Image (cartoon, rainbow, N blue to C red):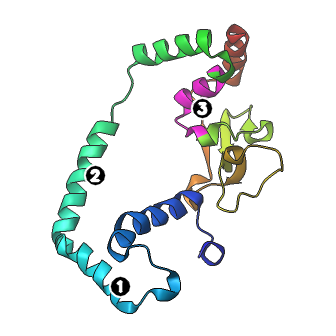
Amino acid sequence: MVDVKDISYNTFVSYRNIIYNYFLKVIGKKYLQDLKSEDFVKALDTTKRRGSRKDYAKEQKKAFRKKVNELTNVYSVEQISTLLYICKNEEPTIFMAILLTVTTGLRISETIAIKYQNIDFLNNKIYIESQLGRTITNDGVPGQSLLTQEKRTKTHNSVREVKCGFKFVQWRKLTRCAR
């Protein structure tokens, strides 16, 4: 499936977890050649008995809303200032990445993948074309970390340009202050 569908690493892990958490609990430890269609029917029936699709959809919607409500905490200016101050003093190597992430709203995987040619200094824009992370095939540069391989963005819409709320002249002053 990995080769045919060209899925991302996170999707692969999600599918694998579904198999481990649901199917294997019902099917048990059997070899692939010993599996019969009845085993799969039994596994599907077990998941169906947990509730109808409508009930399941309601539960998922309720859980999603709860999760969104928990995750939509936006940092205040004071909290961001504190975060940046502590980061600058205790972890100066990641200060610039955190500053850029906070001021542009980028994902951290997108922030660490930015190259010099992705920045338009005249128009104050950053072009997001890739991200760093782990690929399903673990291809990349030998000897480098699997977690920092350059890969395409998750969706087509993730390739975008981000208008910066500051001028890069100001950015250069900030970088001098960070040193």
Q: Please report whichever mark, 2 or 3, sits nearer to the chain's N-terminal start.
A: 2
Residue at mark 2 to residue at mark 3: CA–CA distance: 31 Å
Mark number displayed over residue 64: 2
The image quarter containing residue 179 is: top right
Give the image quarter of residue 84: top right
SS for callout 1: helix
Where are the magenta residues, as a range? 95-108
Q: Main secondary structure of the magenta part?
A: helix
Does the magenta run of residues contain 178?
no
Categorize mark 3 by other alpha carbons within 10 Å: few (<14), some (14-19), many (20+): some
Q: Is 66 displayed left or right of 15 in the figure?
A: left
Q: Name the residue under label 1.
A: 39
- In this orientation, which residue lies closer to the viewer: 46 or 69? 46
Residue marked by disc 3: 164
Question: Which amino acid does the dot numbered 1 rest on?
Answer: Asp
Depth check: give the residue in front, 47 or 162. 47
Give the vertical position of 165 relative to 127 (above or below).
above
Q: What is the three-letter code of the residue carrying label 2?
A: Phe
Question: Can you give x and y, in whole percent of width and height, for residue 102 in the image?
Answer: 53, 28
Q: Give the mark nearest the N terminus, 3 or 1.
A: 1
Please tell me whether mark 2 or mark 3 is closer to you in this view: 2
Secondary element at tag 2: helix
